[in-house]
Image (cartoon, helix red, strand yellow):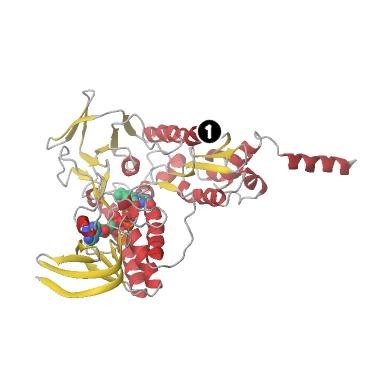
């Protein structure tokens, strides 16, 4: 049955994840008529239901209940709660997700954002058909569209997914039991986060990555430090291990590697890749096509696709595929679509990997500086050198900064360890405001804090960098004054 009583909007947003949400709220604030369509019956997208928020809630629960942060003082056997079960992990998860959805619904109401639940597909460049329930659809039209449909898990046929012991990363959040052993396929961000989180719960974890390296966009020094830490925490990391076969043998899951070795575990998480969620969008009717991974190409300044009134933002346009960047992109796309001037994005944004330990970076890695032929100096601080780190019982964790020898500007900061994803924002501010090594030398930092690591790393580099001429003049003047 089709309802042809069409409604017309200034902007229709497909998808209510971070990109869609920020675009819709921006449009509402500009007093435009905006509709958000989502195929799921709850707002929030992957970010709220199967990605960012639930995985970070799970991490926090694991670290709290396992007493992870206290173990260096009280020993590896220390627990806040014995016999942590799947129900302990689920309880906090449900509360956090409910709260997130509630906040979002409230924001939509306050900004007069209309919502429609159903699967949207283009029937023409300005029209969508929305399947609101089986056999029932409605049509809507708009001047402008934003495709913010994100991604879905990649589920190769060679992996025997069964919904209980062989899972993708969406299913993994609905665990009914905590396995005694877990194999994680793929050492990308998602794989690394879950592998290290479950190792913190004392689950025997094997992480398999066909390539020789992992997280290649992170500075190698950090990855070496991180690899050492996660191995120490019990993750059996198998790099350079192509997968021959994954078998569901009933009582266990068996992975056969290219070198003939076998890995057996109670459960397997397949976390190797995601695909753009575009196959149901009828893009051909709107004059659009995707790449082989279902992603759309856009102008990275305006977020327009090649059909100028159709925009795309968030994971559906590919890299960097973060909730944080999706929020930015959605808002900018809405401003452009609704002819409202806004500021361009700053060049450097942070990456946060919520593994155990955390990793966060902003700007260039040492490898990138070398590739670009930029002469540089390095400053390093270990968290155990800071009083705060000592108070917290941190045995690991480091901050590494890279400075241009020519301009003295900070060009890259890489952090691994407790609080990395919060600490990085100091670096981000200094980087985007074009600050130099001198900022860290001249400024006083709260004491005792982990942020003091910036001061230590700044001084470390400063003491090895040539002294600028103007500083020498200052010193000569002082000498003369003394005479
Ligand atoms: C396990 C995991 C952990 C993550 N952790 C982090 C993190 O810590 N920090 C971070 O910044 N990012 C993280 N991410 C990435 C983050 O979740 C995504 O970058 C973000 O959700 C992308 O937002 P989006 O707006 O592009 O769309 P999504 O959040 O993917 O939402 C898209 C929405 O579109 C809807 N949709 C799709 N097709 C249609 C259609 N045809 N009709 C109607 N509706 C449709 C879907 O139902 C969905 O609700 C994580 C991702 C995963 C999977």
Q: Is residue 342 left or right of residue 198?
A: right
Where, quadrant-wise, is the C terminus in this rendering?
top right
Where, quadrant-wise, is the N terminus in this rendering?
bottom left
Any part of residue 91 in sight:
no
- Quadrant in the rendering for residue 387: top right
Question: Helix, strand or loop at disc 1?
Answer: loop
Q: Residue 166 at what x, y percent from top left?
A: 18, 42
Q: How many marks on residues?
A: 1
Q: Residue furthest right?
A: 483
- Where does label 1 land, which residue? 373
Q: Is residue 408 left or right of residue 372?
A: right
Rendered position, 53 above or below 196: below
At x 65%, y 35%, the residue is 465
Rendered position, 43 above or below 403: below
Question: 414 and 294: which one is in front?
Answer: 294
Q: Residue furthest top?
A: 259
Rendered position, 243 above or below 160: above
Question: 406 and 387: which one is in front?
Answer: 406
Any part of residue 149 in sight:
yes
Q: Residues within 10 Å of mark 1 (few under 14, many from 20)?
A: few
At x 62%, y 38%, the residue is 406
Q: Quadrant of ligand 1?
A: bottom left
Q: Is residue 158 left or right of residue 93?
A: left
Q: Is residue 146 left or right of residue 29?
A: left
Q: Is mark 1 within 8 Å of ligand 1?
A: no
Q: Residue 280 at what x, y percent from top left?
A: 19, 56
Rendered position, 324 above or below 128: above
Q: Residue 124 at what x, y percent from top left?
A: 21, 63
Q: Residue 468 at what x, y percent from top left?
A: 71, 39
């Amino acid at each position: 049955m089709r309802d042809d009583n069409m409604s017309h909007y200034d902007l229709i947003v497909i998808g209510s994840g971070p990109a869609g949400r920020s675009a819709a709220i921006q449009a509402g604030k500009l007093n435009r008529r905006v509709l958000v369509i989502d195929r799921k019956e709850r707002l929030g997208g992957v970010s709220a239901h199967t990605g960012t928020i639930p995985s970070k809630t799970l991490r926090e629960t694991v670290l709290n209940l396992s007493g992870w942060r206290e173990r260096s003082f009280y020993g590896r056997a220390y627990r806040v709660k014995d016999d942590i079960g799947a129900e302990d992990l689920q309880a906090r998860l449900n509360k956090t997700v409910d709260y997130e959805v509630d906040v979002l619904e409230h924001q939509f109401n306050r900004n007069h954002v209309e919502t429609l639940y159903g699967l949207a597909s283009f029937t023409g460049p300005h029209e969508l058909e929305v399947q609101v329930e089986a056999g029932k659809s409605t049509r809507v039209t708009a001047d402008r569209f934003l495709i913010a449909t994100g991604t879905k898990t990649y589920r190769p046929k060679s992996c025997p997914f069964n919904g209980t012991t062989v899972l993708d990363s969406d299913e993994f959040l609905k665990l009914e039991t905590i396995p005694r052993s877990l194999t994680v396929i793929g050492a990308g961000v998602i794989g690394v986060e879950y592998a290290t989180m479950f190792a913190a719960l004392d689950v025997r974890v094997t992480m398999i990555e066909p390539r020789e390296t992992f997280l290649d966009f992170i500075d190698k020094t950090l990855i070496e430090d991180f690899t050492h830490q996660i191995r120490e925490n019990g993750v059996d990391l198998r790099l350079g291990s192509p997968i021959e076969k994954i078998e569901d043998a009933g009582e266990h899951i068996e992975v056969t590697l290219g070198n003939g070795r076998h890995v057996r575990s109670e459960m397997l998480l397949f976390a190797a890749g995601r695909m753009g969620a575009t196959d149901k969008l009828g893009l051909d009717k709107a004059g659009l096509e995707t790449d082989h991974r279902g992603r759309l190409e856009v102008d990275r300044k305006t977020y327009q696709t090649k059909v100028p009134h159709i925009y795309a933002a968030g994971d559906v346009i590919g890299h960097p595929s973060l909730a944080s960047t999706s929020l930015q992109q959605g808002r900018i796309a809405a401003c452009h679509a609704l002819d409202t001037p806004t500021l361009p994005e700053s060049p450097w944004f942070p990456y946060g990997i919520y593994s155990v330990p955390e990793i966060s970076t902003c700007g260039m890695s040492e490898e990138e500086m070398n590739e670009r032929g930029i002469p540089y100096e390095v400053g390093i601080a270990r968290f155990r050198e800071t009083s705060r780190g000592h108070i917290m019982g941190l045995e690991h964790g480091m901050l590494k900064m890279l400075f241009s020898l020519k301009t003295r500007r900070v060009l890259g900061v890489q952090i691994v360890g407790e609080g990395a994803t919060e600490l990085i924002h100091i670096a981000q501010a200094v980087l985007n405001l074009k600050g130099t090594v001198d900022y860290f030398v001249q400024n006083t930092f709260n004491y005792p804090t982990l942020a003091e690591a910036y001061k230590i790393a700044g001084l470390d580099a400063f003491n090895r960098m040539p002294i600028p001429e103007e500083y020498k003049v200052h010193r000569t003047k002082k000498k003369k004054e003394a005479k």
